[in-house]
Amino acid sequence: MTHSHPAPWRHIPYIPYTPPQGGLAAARNFHDAMRRRRSIRFFSDRPIEAGVLDLAIAAAGSAPSGANKQPWRFVVVQDAGIKREIRLAAEAEERDFYARRAPPDWLADLAPLGTDSEKPFLETAPALIVVMKLMKDDPDAQGRQGNTYYVNESVGIAVGFLLAALHLSGLATLTHTPSPMGFLTKVLGRPEHERPFLLIPTGYPAPGCTVPDIVKKPLGQIMVKDRG
Ligand SMILES: Cc1cc2nc3c(=O)[nH]c(=O)nc-3n(C[C@H](O)[C@H](O)[C@H](O)COP(=O)(O)O)c2cc1C
């Protein structure tokens, strides 16, 4: 029995990743670290160590994607003027959301988080990572654009990698979705085939930063074995 793929496609050996401490210890370490991740909404302006964002985004770029189309772009915004433009545009949308567009159920679900239309962190955080999803491939030299597949699933997985990489590098994040996010295309001058997916402020927490006292569902509630 063969475990390699038939010609004509070129295949290479798969090199397994073997955690030096063993699988269970590695799983435990990862869980211990990840369960301490929280979304924060109070950032300090402390700069991010050089190289960390590049490596975290490169890690995100290693994610699986539909037909390996890698339908993502990560726009790193560190310029104070652009951050201010984003804050002003986001707050305008959010004021309308909280005052008019949000259905009562949604507002009730948001209440324990204490969020409102003020978004100072969009200026305070040293970096905003604007994640764009690619609705088509980038154009080739002739301007032709191929398709992308399972775009939301693929970009969602890549963002999971990104959040984990940033967290394990000691940075905090907020997964932010000012609604609607179309203004980001304009402010950042992105092309038509890219659509805003998420806005991720990242940096270090402000001194005394607090987070909502929420709980995660226990394993027994989120995992089912076989048919339960
Ligand atoms: C897709 C998505 C969109 C979110 N949008 C917002 C947002 O616009 N504003 C905000 O303050 N938090 C937002 N959050 C953060 C959630 O409120 C937060 O993840 C949740 O309350 C759980 O808290 P934790 O991240 O600290 O575990 C979003 C999270 C996700 C995954």
Image (cartoon, rainbow, N blue to C red):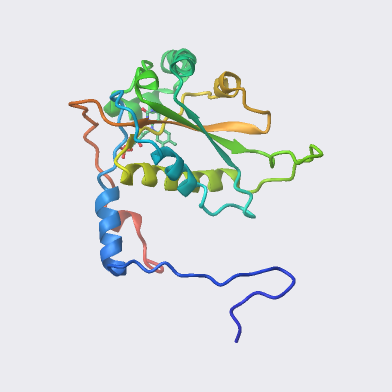
At x 36%, y 62%, the residue is 224
At x 35%, y 21%, the residue is 121
- The count of marks equals 0
At x 63%, y 38%, the residue is 134
Given residues 174 and 142, the one toward you in this image is 142
Left or right, 170 with reference to 150: left
Q: Is residue 113 above or below residue 4?
A: above
Given residues 47 and 116, the one toward you in this image is 47
> On the rendered image, what quadrant is the C terminus found in?
bottom left
Residue 133: image x %, image y %? 58, 37
Left or right, 53 with reference to 148: left
> On the rendered image, what quadrant is the N terminus found in?
bottom right
Q: Is residue 91 above or below residue 28?
A: above
Ligand 1 shows up in which quadrant of the image?
top left
At x 38%, y 16%, the residue is 117
Residue 210: image x %, image y %? 21, 29
Given residues 89 and 143, the one toward you in this image is 143
Quadrant of residue 118 within the rendered picture: top left
